[in-house]
Image: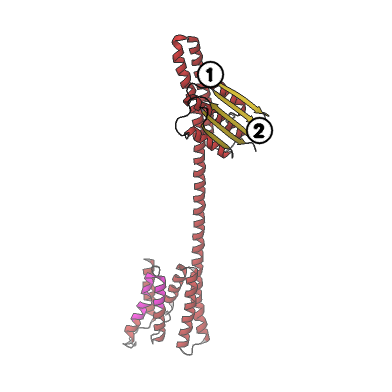
Amino acid sequence: MVDTALALALAALTWGTMGLDEDCPCPARPLAVALALAQTLPLAFRRVAPVPVLVLLGLVTGIHGASTVSDPTVFFGALVALYTAVSLSDRRTSVVLGAVTAVAVGLSVLASGDTPFATVALNYVVFGTAWILGDSVRTHRAYAAELEDRAASAERRRQEDANRAAAEERVRMARELHDVVAHHVSLIAVQSEAAQVLLPKDPGRAAEAVEAIATTARQALTELRRLLGALREDGDGPASVSPQPGDLAIGSLVDSVRDAGVPVSLTVRGNLRPLPDAVAVSAYRIVQESLTNVVKHAGPATAAVVVDYGADELVLEVTDDGRGRPGDGTGHGLVGMRERVTLLGGQLRAGPRREGGFGVEARLPLS
């Protein structure tokens, strides 16, 4: 709509400056009308086909200059077309258009014969100004588009980083919830079955089993509250949660499994010393998941836990002499153990033992 209005306005202006009075020769009148329309109306399509419109108006302007029709606005349409084509083209095309325009202006000067130098200079200044304005607009648009692309790319990277961090946090929390819930629920299930069997025969021992169930449930609730507290943290400061269980809590972990009726031995070797938090937490969870699997899958069995404080690594071994774990050993618990060990740059081996039962060995670097 804007381009159409511009074309009509220039057509009216050109019509009014052509001097089409009663003294105008009749043969010149149709030519003047045609030139007025041909050098202005195509501007209605200057944004749709900028280069073709520029070429067309350049030819019409040349024809007009060679005719006998007088018109001081002969260059207006060509100037607008040149500005539009340069502003909407890439850098290479705009340079080519400028060079072609300069050559065309020179050829028109040569064709017109003796043209005053001032007129030649004015033509180059006018068309040069149109080219410079168009190129400035093109440069500004390209710069703005580049800024928008950079901003969009930065936003995409930020969103990808946020999604990745959220996914990693979900995996971490899922692993923690699995370790807590699976372990304590398995112990509660075993203790409940024991209480049910003992209740008719030995109410005292059945009561001990029920008390063990209550203790295990309280421990599970404590750890679940800790995890939920961590989820509620807004990230503006250190998490106000209790310390996660480390190497010193393995003894109480073994005791809880013993209370469930599974004989477990604990052997600690090497130079006992404080462990890095990440190693301590992973060590606890690995032993916890391994003993949970013993309770769930081994059946009547005994288990052995070995904690070896080496110079450069902490070695954990959990073995049992039960019927072993069904399947290929790729359940959520073992997957979680492998993820923990991999994050620390360690090694994990888990599978059936030659002498029967199942074994887990984890090597966690201390540096």
Which SS type dominates the magenta stretch? helix
Q: Amino acid at mark 2?
A: Gly
x, y (%) of residue 238? 59, 35
10 to 19, vertically: above or below: above
48 to 287, vertically: above or below: below
Label 1: which secondary element: helix
| Residue occupying the point 46% across, 18% down | 192
Q: Which residues are magenta?
A: 33-57
Residue with the mark numbered 2: 310
The residue positioned farthest toward the front in the image shown: 355
Query: How would you rate the neighbour count of disc 2 (Cα within 10 Å): few for under 14, some for 14-19, many for 20 or more?
Result: some
Instruction: Name the image colouring.
Output: secondary structure
| Residue occupying the point 49% across, 22% down | 187
Residue 259: assigned label: 1
150 to 275, vertically: above or below: below
Q: Quadrant of the N terminus?
A: bottom left
276 to 194, vertically: above or below: below
| Residue occupying the point 47% across, 85% down | 109
Report, in whole angstroms, how far the alpha carbon at label 1 lies from the one at label 2: 30 Å
Label 2: which secondary element: loop
Q: Amino acid at mark 1?
A: Asp
Tell me which numbered mark, 1 or 2, is placed earlier along the sequence. Answer: 1
Q: Is residue 239 visible?
A: no
